[in-house]
Image (tube, rainbow, N blue to C red):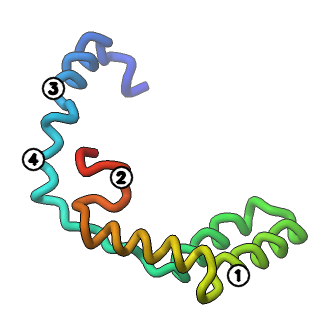
């Protein structure tokens, strides 16, 4: 196994060097990520569930996703909130600007 020769103290020392206070230097090099369109997110969600759910549950989930993504529905409202957050923060995925 590749990790067999790594001493635990080495890992702790490395982790102490890579701390959240040093992560800010990476933000300037990572491009801002766009909020994906709601339809793309919902299609990806269904695609991920296809091999996991039996047909009747998948059909039920498709109906729920369709309801969620309908114009004026909850999905559209939440999508607008994400897009607004993306316009006003550096990282719309994270709960704060420091992660």
Q: Along the horizontal axis of the image, is 47 left or right of 76?
A: right
Lower position in the chain sequence, tag 3 or tag 2? 3
Q: CA distance from mark 4 to mark 1?
A: 41 Å
Q: Are marks 1 and 2 in contact (CB under 8 Å)?
A: no
Spatial CA distance of label 3 from label 1 is 47 Å
Q: Tags 2 and 4 in contact by the CB under 8 Å rule?
A: no
- Specify the quadrant of the image occupied by residue 59: bottom right
Query: Which secondary structure lies at badge 4?
Result: helix
Q: Nearer the viewer, residue 71 or 4?
A: 71
Distance of label 3 from label 2 (alpha carbons): 22 Å
Element carrying mark 2: loop
Residue under the point 24% across and 25% down: 15
Vertical order, 21 against 24 (above or below): above
* In the displayed structure image, the side of residue 42 where residue 49 appears, left or right: right
Residue depth check, mark 3 versus mark 2: number of the one nearer the observer? 2
First in sequence: mark 2 or mark 4?
4
Real-space Cα separation, disc 1 to disc 2, in angstroms: 26 Å
Tell me if residue 78 comes above or below residue 18 in the rendering: below
Front: mark 4 or 3? 4
Residue at numbered disc 4: 25
Q: Which residue is mark 3?
A: 17
Q: Position of residue 39 (x, y in %)?
A: 55, 82
CA separation in Å, label 2 and label 4: 17 Å
Q: Report the residue marked by disc 1.
A: 66
């Amino acid at each position: 196994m590749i990790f067999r020769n790594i001493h635990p103290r080495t890992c702790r020392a490395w982790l102490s060097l890579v701390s959240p206070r040093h992560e800010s230097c990476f933000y300037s090099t990572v491009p801002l990520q766009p909020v994906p369109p709601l339809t793309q997110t919902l299609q990806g969600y269904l695609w991920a569930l296809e091999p996991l759910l039996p047909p009747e549950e998948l059909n039920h989930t498709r109906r729920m996703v369709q309801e969620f993504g309908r114009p004026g529905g909850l999905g559209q409202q939440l999508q607008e909130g994400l897009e607004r957050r993306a316009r006003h923060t550096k990282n719309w995925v994270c709960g704060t600007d420091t992660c």
